[in-house]
Image: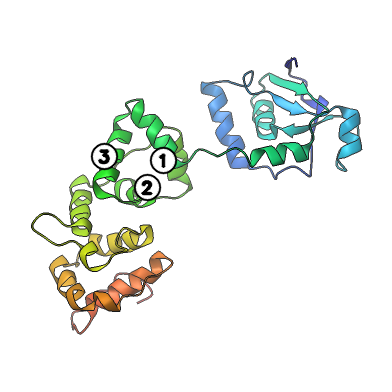
Amino acid sequence: MRKIPTKNYNIFTLISENRPIDWKRVNWLRKELKNNNMLQQYDILCNSKEKSMERYASCDGFGMGIIDGQHRFLSAKLENKTVYYTVDDSVTLDDVSKASAFQRPWTLKDHLHKYKTKGLQEYKKFAGYMSRSHFPISACSIILCGGRGAYFKTTFEQGEMKCNQDWSKAEDFSEVINGTDTKKGVIFYIKYALNSRFIEAFWTLFKHKKYDHSRMMAKLEYLASTMQKCPDKAGFLRELSRVYNYNTRSKVRFYEEE
């Protein structure tokens, strides 16, 4: 089936029944088009005007309904790039949505493997720390990059991730959790210490200017069994703070709610 090039964007129509437009993705694709235009390799799939009007309530017969590639279409239109499209009435929007269930999207681990294998130093360093610490990738991103939100995810996926945090503190923290040949780690007392949200909570304590690790380990020795496993960082932070400040006058506030 032949791909057809065009800059006549008016021959297409968006289908309201399709997925909602993600404008963050459109903006990301616009940037990608400026550096690496692969629209010819990833054409837009449409139904004919007649079939579109017959199948989709939002189509009025004046344009071909885009059943796959609406984000690529919008980014190309906004950048005034040539669109490549294929018309195939044997495929419907339902077929496209069902087919997507068979596709596994790329994970951060997949991107990490790709860029590490390509030799990008920041990703090799990140992967090395992750391997040594046994921490989940989301926890490593907070420790090494300072966050794990949408901005981090985007830069990570685009190969622009930077490990810009204190490396020596990150290495010290890994030893605190895992222990060494001569010192017990937190995991000796708390078996779920490699839980991502637990690590995030403990990292909040560890970074605090008033945190004393010897004090925490002394408390864990007889209070670890009283700790509750929590579903989120906030819960773990409350539990760790309770243990750290137990039966002590010089209490330290590790979070605003205290």
Image coloring type: rainbow
Residue 88: image location, x then y, percent: 80, 25
Looking at the rendered image, the quarter that the C terminus falls into is bottom left
Residue 176 lies, in percent from the top left, at 19, 58
Q: Residues within 10 Å of mark 3 (few under 14, many from 20)?
A: few
Q: How many marks?
A: 3
**Residue 83 visible within the image:** yes
Q: Quick one: label 2, few (<14), some, or many (20+) residues within 10 Å?
A: some
Amino acid type assigned to the residue bearing label 2 in the image: Ile
- Residue with the most extreme left position: 182
Q: Please indicate whether residue 4 sits to the left or right of residue 56 in the image.
A: left
Please provide percent x and percent y for residue 253. Answer: 28, 73
The one nearer the camera, 206 or 189, is 189
For mark 1, what is the residue? 109
Q: Is 174 placed left or right of 104 in the picture?
A: left
Mark 1 residue crowding within 10 angstroms, few (<14) / some (14–19) / many (20+): few
Q: Position of residue 78 (x, y in %)?
A: 66, 29
Amino acid bearing label 1: Lys
Measure the alpha-carbon separation of dots 3 and 1. 13 Å
Q: Which residue is mark 3?
A: 128
- At 20% from the left and 49% from the top, the residue drawn is 171
**What residue sits 86% from the left and 40% below the top?**
56
Could you tell me which secondary element the residue under label 1 belongs to? helix
Query: Is disc 2 placed on a helix, strand or loop?
Result: helix
241 in relation to 101, above or below: below
Residue 251, placed above or below residue 104: below
- Image point 39% across, 71% down: which residue? 235
User: Is the residue under label 2 in contact with that under label 1 (CB below 8 Å)?
Assistant: yes
Secondary structure beneath disc 3? helix
- Residue 137 circle label: 2
How many angstroms separate mark 3 from mark 2 (CA)?
Answer: 11 Å
Q: Amino acid at mark 3?
A: Gly
